[in-house]
Image (cartoon, rainbow, N blue to C red):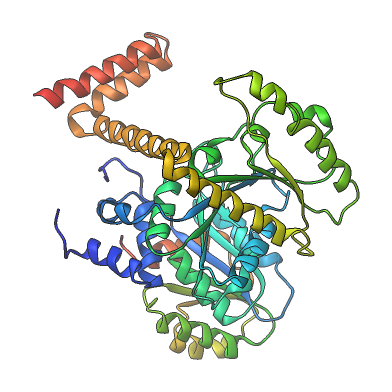
Amino acid sequence: MSVGTGDSSLADRARKGDRRALARLLSEVENRTAAGEQALRLLYPQAGNAHLVGVTGAPGSGKSTLVAALVTAARATGRPVAVIAIDPSSPITGGAILGDRVRMQAHAGDRDVFIRSMASRGHPGGLAASTVAAAAVLDASGFPLIFIETVGTGQSEVEVASIADTTVVVQAPEMGDEVQAIKAGLLEVADIVVVNKSDRPGADRAASQLRAMLTVGAQHDRAMGDRPRPKRPDVLLGSAMTGSGVPELLAALDRRDAARRERGAETLDAAALKRAEAQISGILAQRVSDQLRQPGRADERSATLRAVATHEIDPFTAADRLLDLLGERGEG
Amino acid sequence: MTSPAEPPRPIKVLIAKPGLDGHDRGAKVLARGLRDEGFEVVYTGLRQTPEMVVSAALQEDVDVVGLSILSGAHMTLLPKICAGLREQGLDDVLVTAGGIIPDADVAALKETGVSKVFGPGTTIREVAEYIRGNVRRSS
């Protein structure tokens, strides 16, 4: 591996606290350039220390405002904090409005707060394809606490839970009854559910309904033995606007982090393994896609796509054919 | 790894309203229009200090900073923002302005680092074309 190139010095400067280099490096990573990949190879071994907190929930539930309040609370304890805030890209034009910063402008000038917006660029699941890599860069650059705010999600965008150490699902009052609370999906992967906007009517009732439905079943859990089971989240009330409940939420996050680190000494954290898998799968998919677009294969790829589109062949046969195509080249 | 078939990355634009005027309709319409032109638009909203604009431009690594100002304070705020960007090493960021800016001030603003001032009646297409033609970053 070549050291001393422009790429490695970008990584080096980012790690030493150069925010301009960090910002540029995040772009390289986001744009999946060779320079970004090179820098990640250097930085990855230095990452793995930060607490990655995923924050997800419906559009308008108050995720950005809550993250801003958490940043303020964390800064009060002296810790550097980073935020990755993802907003959706247009499926039509590829453009995006990245509007999460609107709620997060209080910390301009504080060099220990670093906020970066990312467009989802077609990646499903509420994140961008390079979110995990971006988090690793921030981690290696010395941010011990990193919030990852997803796009506004619905019921089943659970990807964030597989890449974050701790997942916070933000709910607002009057977003549904007990049946919503027992539906499978997003609420099952929460470590902490926050009923935000607790200054609004109905918040207490929403919290107690969620608590009743999500935290019951401890006895059933034991009976389930080793079978996979949903998490039993803490349900907290909070108001990002007034700040009420925010210190308690940060304390709950810190407790989760401490418990995770203690466990980590004995067994490798499940979240870390999932994160590794998600990263490798993403890179594999990208590599395969890139390889298929190489000049020698692009024609066959297009022909295969057309054959599936016109129902001449089925997509399984098509996938096998393309994999064979990669194999031929790989061996030859 | 990059491949030749990969589409070019979207141009990233920061749209901000420095100062104290509360008229953000234009900035929002432009943000939306540039979204439709395929740009990634970071929108930071109203009442931004020069420090906030510079900090957002740095952290977001934008290609363009678009400043909307209708308060009349452009001769104070815009040079401060341009100086702040240079101070942070963001010399390659294209700075444009729009809103209510008298023609008589345009030359002076250009000297401080504003590349282009768009007056009332400018179409979104014109803004997008100007940005595409003048973005300085190649990577």
Picture residue at 78% right of the left edge, 58% below the top: A239
Query: Hey, which residue is sitting farthest right in the picture?
Result: A201
Picture residue at 54% right of the left edge, 76% below the top: A110
Residue A162, image x and y in percent?
50, 37
From the viewer's perspective, tell me whether residue A285 is left or right of residue B38.
left
Residue A67, image x and y in percent?
64, 58
In the depicted structure, whether residue B93 falls above or below residue A68:
below
Residue A177, image x and y in percent?
84, 32
Q: Quadrant of residue A100?
A: bottom right
Please tell me which residue lies in front, A263 or B46.
Answer: A263
Please tell me which residue lies in front, B139 or A11.
Answer: A11
From the viewer's perspective, tell me whether residue A68 is left or right of residue B137.
right
Residue A120, image x and y in percent?
50, 45
Residue A202 appears in view: yes
Q: Quadrant of residue A273?
A: top left
- Number of numbered labels in the structure image: 0
Residue A94 appears in view: no
Location of the C terminus of chain A by quadrant is top left
In the depicted structure, whether residue A272 falls above or below residue A74:
above
Picture residue at 54% right of the left edge, 51% below the top: A257
Please tell me which residue lies in front, A19 or A136.
Answer: A136
Picture residue at 42% right of the left edge, 59% below the top: A138
In the depicted structure, whether residue A293 falls above or below residue A234:
above
Query: Hey, which residue is sitting farthest left in the picture?
Result: A332
